[in-house]
Image (spheres, helix red, strand yellow):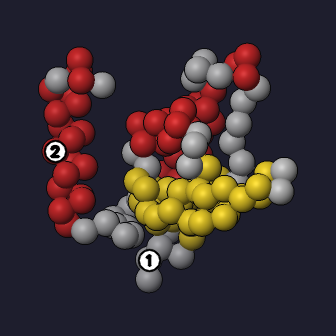
Amino acid sequence: DRHTRMFYIMTLGTAREFRRAGLGSILVDRVLDMINKMPECGALYLHVITYNVGAIRLYERLGFSKVKEIEDYYSINNVNHNCYLYARYFHGNRGHKTIYDVMYDFATSILKNVLPWRN
């Protein structure tokens, strides 16, 4: 198998007063730059709590796809919360995606460039 490595973002957060300033994108972009230089790395994974809509939008905008929902992944103040597992694949690895998913992502990326007002 040519993809012998993967990356995992364990924690990514910013203080409330620094949110929406692009810091999360910058940090993920640094990881993406590292991965793009490592052809043996086939995937980048992360978990996000299901109610963190801002983070979910960020990850999807950065090309991550939702793989599945995991029940009771987080326990915060003795209350369990579900999370989503997100992934982004590299260097020819399609991971959980079907050919339909790959074609849809390709068409969507083309449309985003042709119709920039849709972003």
**Image coordinates for residue 89, horizontal then vertical, percent:** 42, 59
Residue 26, compared with residue 96, is above or below; it is above
Residue 94, compared with residue 37, is above or below; it is below
Disc number placed over residue 97 in the picture, else none: none
Disc 1 crowd, CA 10 A, few/some/many (<14, 14-19, 20+): few
Q: Residue at x 83, y 57 (%)?
A: 78
Name which residue type carries label 1. Arg
| Upstream in sequence: badge 1 or badge 2 | 1
**Image coordinates for residue 10, horizontal then vertical, percent:** 70, 54
Name which residue type carries label 2. Ala
Disc number placed over residue 107 in the picture, else none: 2
Disc number placed over residue 2 in the picture, else none: 1
Most foreground residue, 15 or 28: 15
Residue 104, compared with residue 62, is above or below; it is below
Q: Residue at x 40, y 53 (%)?
A: 65
**Image coordinates for residue 115, horizontal then vertical, percent:** 17, 23
* Left or right: 82 as drawn, with respect to 98: right
Q: CA distance from mark 1 to mark 2?
A: 27 Å
Count of numbered marks: 2
Nearer the observer: mark 1 or 2; the answer is 2
Disc 2 crowd, CA 10 A, few/some/many (<14, 14-19, 20+): few
* Quarter of the N terminus within the rendering: bottom left
**Image coordinates for residue 11, horizontal then vertical, percent:** 71, 48
Q: Residue at x 54, y 33 (%)?
A: 54
* Quarter of the C terminus within the rendering: top left
In the image as oriented, which residue stretches furthest toward the front?
79
Most foreground residue, 79 or 56: 79
- Which image quadrant is residue 8 in? bottom right
Q: Is residue 104 visible?
A: yes
